[in-house]
Image (cartoon, rainbow, N blue to C red):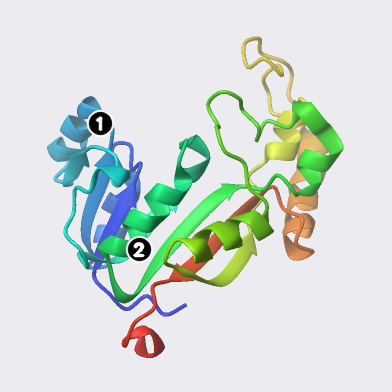
Amino acid sequence: PGLDGSRILDVGSGEGAFLLAVRQAAWEVTGLEISRQAALNAASMGVRLVVGELAEGVFASGSFDLVRLWSVLEHLRDPAAALREAARILRPGGWAIIQVPNAAGLAARLTGERWSGWDVPVHITHFTPATLRALVRANGLEPRELHHTSVGTLALSLGLSGVSPAGQLPRRNNMPAQALIALGDQLLDLVGLGDCVMLFAQKAGAEEHGA
């Protein structure tokens, strides 16, 4: 999609590494993070980071051209409320970029309860492409493009990531197997079975066709 605006909000932005990168493209950047320490660290690098949660209504309506929700919705008990708030603070025709683990991907199907994307209780809500599109559409945004974006979950679930499945004990890397799985991840993305999905969604409005 054509993201022609200049005001971006990154939700769950940590210490602002993504915002530092996109600021170089002349975006006006703001982060939202629940950690006060992260906000202090970001401020030391010149990044504006607001402490709070999206559903708290921190920002005025129409404040942003783009809202990024990257690995955020799966952590929320009420992702619908976050999406409604994202729609409210976007300008007409503005965009949301949403990324979540894909519970319908091949990694989840093959590894079952061992799939690291479940990550209970850290991940509270789980999505398939169909349920993500439906939730987005029901809360003020129109799904436009969906891409599969594997991030190595299959390797982690199969215990080939360099750590034990419990994430505690080191284990010897199996480099040939990892290379094959990395190639497999790319192929899964191409056929629509990747272990994460990234959705571009747009707020309706008079400007949407020119955005």
SS at circle 1: helix
Q: Position of residue 119 (x, y in %)?
A: 61, 28
Residue 70 visible at all: no
First in residue order: circle 1 vs circle 2: 1
Residue 80 left/right relative to 167:
left
Residue 109 left/right relative to 6:
right
Reply above or below: 62 against 34. below
Query: The C terminus is located in which quarter?
Result: bottom left
Which residue position holds label 2?
87
Q: In this orientation, which residue lies closer to the viewer: 18 or 99?
A: 99
- Using the numbered discs, state the Cα–Cα distance from disc 1 to disc 2 in whole angstroms: 25 Å
Give the amino acid at mark 1.
Answer: Ala
Q: Quadrant of residue 148?
A: bottom right
**Is disc 2 surrounded by few (<14), some (14 to 19) or many (20+) residues within 10 Å?**
many
Reply above or below: 200 against 11. below
Reply above or below: 153 against 134. above
Residue at the image position 82 percent from the left and 33 percent from the top: 111
Residue at the image position 25 percent from the left and 47 percent from the top: 31
Which residue position holds label 1?
38
Residue 95 left/right relative to 28:
right
Q: In this orientation, which residue lies closer to the viewer: 84 or 110?
A: 84
Marking on residue 153:
none
Residue 30 left/right relative to 140:
left
Instruction: Tell me whether circle 1 and circle 2 mark residues in contact (CB < 8 Å).
Output: no
Give the amino acid at mark 2.
Answer: Ala
Q: Position of residue 138 (x, y in %)?
A: 50, 63
Q: Position of residue 59 (x, y in %)?
A: 18, 54
